Image (cartoon, coloured by chain):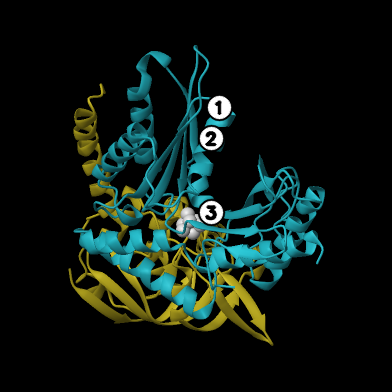
Chain colours: A cyan, B yellow
Amino acid sequence: MEIANVVENVAFNLIKQAVIYLPEDVKQALKKAYAEETSAAGKTQLKAILDNIELAEKYKAPICQDTGTIIFYANAGADVKHLDKIENALINATRKATKEVPLRPNAVDPFTQKNSGDNTGRFIPYINWDIVPGDTLELTVMTKGGGSENVCTTGMLVPGEGINGLKKFVIEAVIKAGSQPCPPTILGVAMGGGSDIAIKLAKKALLKPLNEPNPNPEIAKLEKELYEAANMTGIGPMGLGGKTTVLGVHVEYAFRHPASFPAAVAFNCWAARRATARIHADGTVEYVTHKGRV
Amino acid sequence: MTEYHFKTPISEEDIRKLKVNDVLYITGTIVTARDQAHRRALEYFKEGKQLPVNLEGLAVFHCGPVVSKEGDKWVAVAAGPTTSTRMDIFEDEFIKNFKVRVVIGKGGMGKRTTDAMAKYGAVYGAFTGGAAILAAKAIKKVKGVEWLDLGTPEALWIFEVEDFGPLAVAIDSHGNNIFMDVAKNVEENRKKIYQKLGLQI
Ligand code: SF4
């Protein structure tokens, strides 16, 4: 089969898997939160979330009515052929998924306010490319909800404040976001690079599984510290109060300009939808996050 | 925390029994309304025109549902709540004029709505954000739709529901508002967090 056809097929499956089935690590984190939540109102919300996840699986229907903006991450092996065909295949897959899953049409022209109706438009679906060694194409889709996107934030901090400035920035972002991003949320936090690089790294960090702290112990410690601090706010599930405000925090960084300290916080809602597959050179496909859900 | 199962129309007496943190399930009729429907309804009232549906004792749901038409019948596919704060500027008049007993949404509402709920007898039921299938499964029938000219999400969708919930009573008719309490609490906790992390306010 042509690579374009394989990619279209796989991308369609990934979108479908992502919007119907939450990744196992997110489900486990929600179950743990439900068991540990002490606020009555918060517990009801977590129970409703878990029931909703189960119903979505049972009826093979999207978990949330906002099926998000479609974003792809393509880790393309340098030896993969016909890479120029992939963009088109991803657009076709998005159109097909919108019709067949179905997805809510979420791509609006900012000039005319017209909705394209099929989740595609200028730069949408957005594709993040990385070139890696080898002949495998790894594709990940993130379908990103609007409520949690609306509270994502970047800031240019004071370099002299160092990491403390970052901690403050993250806590204030969580407090300001309140109930808006449908907590419990997942936070992607990044510093350095530049304003664009920081938010890009922060958003990409949302793809990491919740049960995998950063391999660098110093970063892992910062992740834990931010996680505990965010959960001390008392915002709780859906902002109704409780100790589960975030399910996890992932920190990323790039080196910074001496005069700048860019920082970014990306939020994902509890409906943290993502799916990954690998397409090998011989045409075989390996579903990574949703084995057996095709 | 007590669990209540009410049937519409709900009386003021029943609604006054609810306290914040109680859980409510509704059977009967709920009607969706977002910004534009609120605005039009209040205009109708001012002009002395009848609403296409009598809201007395019913629940109003802040929701722009995903609906599909199967034959000539509408079906609610996904119907999660939308953010309620946008309706804060209309809700006090809405409760007063139309005697709705329950307002369903996500994210909570402010002081104006809280005061109106205390005065006229209504509660705010928080429905879990994103739990669209849970909501859709409790909708047994789309009884009707009015004001479709406002667009699908903004129209008045009249749903027949069975045990629609769980709704966390987040504002009761006695002046209590969980969201305002949480906000106060968060302010206090911010100090503790700063202290723990060794940060300056
Ligand atoms: S923030 Fe997430 S869970 Fe909440 S409504 Fe939007 S997509 Fe759904």
Q: Is residue A246 in sight in this rendering? A: yes
Q: Locate the C terminus of chain B by quadrant.
A: top left
Q: Amino acid at mark 1?
A: Ser
Q: Is residue B123 in sight in this rendering? A: no
Q: Nearer the viewer, mark 2 or mark 3?
A: 2
Q: Answer above or below: position of A2 versus A226.
A: below
Q: Answer above or below: position of B30 versus B97.
A: below
Q: Residues within 10 Å of mark 1 (few under 14, many from 20)?
A: some
Which one is nearer the viewer's eye here, A171 or B162? A171
- Which type of secondary structure does the marked residue at label 3 adopt? loop
Name the residue located 34 percent from the left edge and 30 percent from the top edge. Answer: A167
Quote the CA–CA distance across marks 3 and 1.
Answer: 22 Å
Q: Which residue is mark 3?
A: A145
Locate residue A269, reporting x and y percent: 44, 53
Quote the CA–CA distance across marks 2 and 3.
Answer: 16 Å
Which one is nearer the viewer's eye here, A260 or B111? A260
Relative to A3, A157 lies left or right: left
Q: Residues within 10 Å of mark 2 (few under 14, many from 20)?
A: many
- Which type of secondary structure does the marked residue at label 1 adopt? helix
Q: Amino acid at mark 2?
A: Ile
Relative to B112, A11 lies left or right: right
Q: Which residue is mark 2?
A: A199
Read off the chain for label 1: A
Ranked by sequence position, the earlier of labels 3 and 1 is 3
Q: Which residue is mark 1?
A: A195
**Cβ of disc 3 within 8 Å of ligand 1?**
yes
Q: Nearer the viewer, mark 3 or mark 1?
A: 1
